[in-house]
Amino acid sequence: MDRIIKKKKWTPARITMLALGSLLAFFIIYLLFFRDNASRLYVDRDRMTIATVQQGSFQEFIPVDGTVQPIVTIYVDAVFGGRVEEIFVRDGAFVEEGDPILRLSNAAIEMDYMYRENNLLEVLNNYQNTRLSLERNKFALERQMADLEYQKDIATKDFNRKRVYNQSGHISEEEFENAEREYNIARRRYDIAYRAMQHDSVYTETQMIQIKESIDRMEDNLSMLNRNLENLTITAPISGQLSSFDAERGETKLSGENLGQIDVLDGFKLRARIDERYVNRTFVGQQAQFDYGGQNYQLEIQKIYSNITAGAFEVDLHFNDEMPEGIRRGQTIQLRLQFSGVADAIIIPRGGFYQETGGNWIYVLDPAGNQATKRRIRIGRQNIHHYEVLEGLEQGEQVITSSYDAFGGKDRLIFR
């Protein structure tokens, strides 16, 4: 009889298929959850700059170029315009305060001076004539008053005498009345003349005061015009070296035109141009320094010019103590303008990586030095040598600081 053969449940083919399915599932899980999906790039280590993260002294500053200038400069301008008639000194000469530099001529000012001078002389002459006339009138009134006073005195005595005679009956009533009438007339004449003389005296005094005030005003105007004439001769306002002076005989200079400047060479200052980005961080008293001849020199900002031109503004810096010997006017010196004091910080050298990352991330090497991984960081202050790192790096780690242009933003760099 036939025997039923049971089919095997785990055949080799089935076992093989199950094994292959398990391997495929494991591979898919590995790809999804365990495989390193970071983008990578193989690079040549020798073609990049690698630096070590350090903890050290850091100071924020920027380099600026300062031009040596005299500590005091006085500009020489033409107060009035005119034609150059005479030149007393040349550019570069040393002058003392008050020394003549050049002389201008101005026909309008000269004619005005002559006209007003003639007017003043005429007024003075009128004043003299008026004063003489008033004095003659005064003397005439005084003589008149003397005569009237004399007549009044005679009439008074005659009246008093005849009044006594009339009372005693020695003279007639008519003769007494005539004496009384003469007395009253003499007294009235005297009183009228006295009041007239007082009024005339007040009028004369007022007129003399007005004439004197008019003369004083004209003399002041004449003095001003005389100063204008004197201002046509340009003199040195201070002792020093004349510079930027350019004038020739016969040339016309305008009123207010700059003729040159006088530099006081007792000391120097530096004038620097600073990028407008730092205008809100720049202040009077801010410190700067530079090295010259093996020595370090300290300066501070004394003046800030508010005008911004071509993206920059200017400041004047004065030396704190001594200034270097041998510097010359117009010489350019590179300064370090300080924005902070010296402090301890985590720092890395400046490099081309900043242009690509903006200081937001950097490639950090692994301890073995075989690869570098992208890591987020936070950059703080900076100077021409270093960046201050606020977050993301520790002392002793190594980073790539050269340009990242060729890396395409890959997550990992593997060194060959």
Image: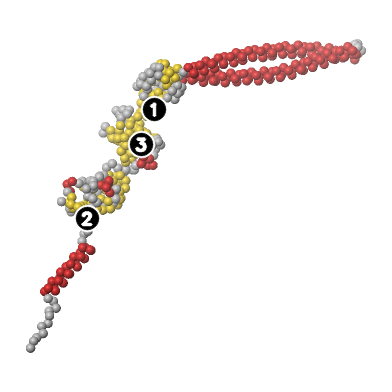
Disc 2 marks which residue? Answer: 39
Decide if residue 320 is in sight here. Answer: no
Give residue 63's quadrant in the image. Answer: top left
Mark 2 residue type: Ser
Q: Name the residue under label 1.
A: 73
244 left or right of 112 in image: left
Amino acid on which disc 1 is placed: Thr
Closer-to-camera residue (115/280): 115
**Residue 256: percent from the left, percent from the top?**
44, 25
Residue that lies at the very extreme toward the left in this rendered image? 1
- Image spot of residue 112 (x, y percent): 52, 18
What residue type is disc 3 on?
Answer: Ala
Relative placement, left or right, of 373 versus 165 is: left
Q: Which of marks 1 and 2 is in front?
A: 2
- Identified at 59% across, 20% down, the residue is 214
Secondary structure beneath dot 2 equals: loop
**Residue 3 shows in this picture:** yes
Q: In this view, does 191 lie to the left or right of 217?
A: right
Specify which label sits upstream in the sequence, 2 or 3.
2
Who's the residue at 23% across and 54% down the image? Answer: 411
**First reached walking from the N terminus: tag 1 or tag 2:** 2
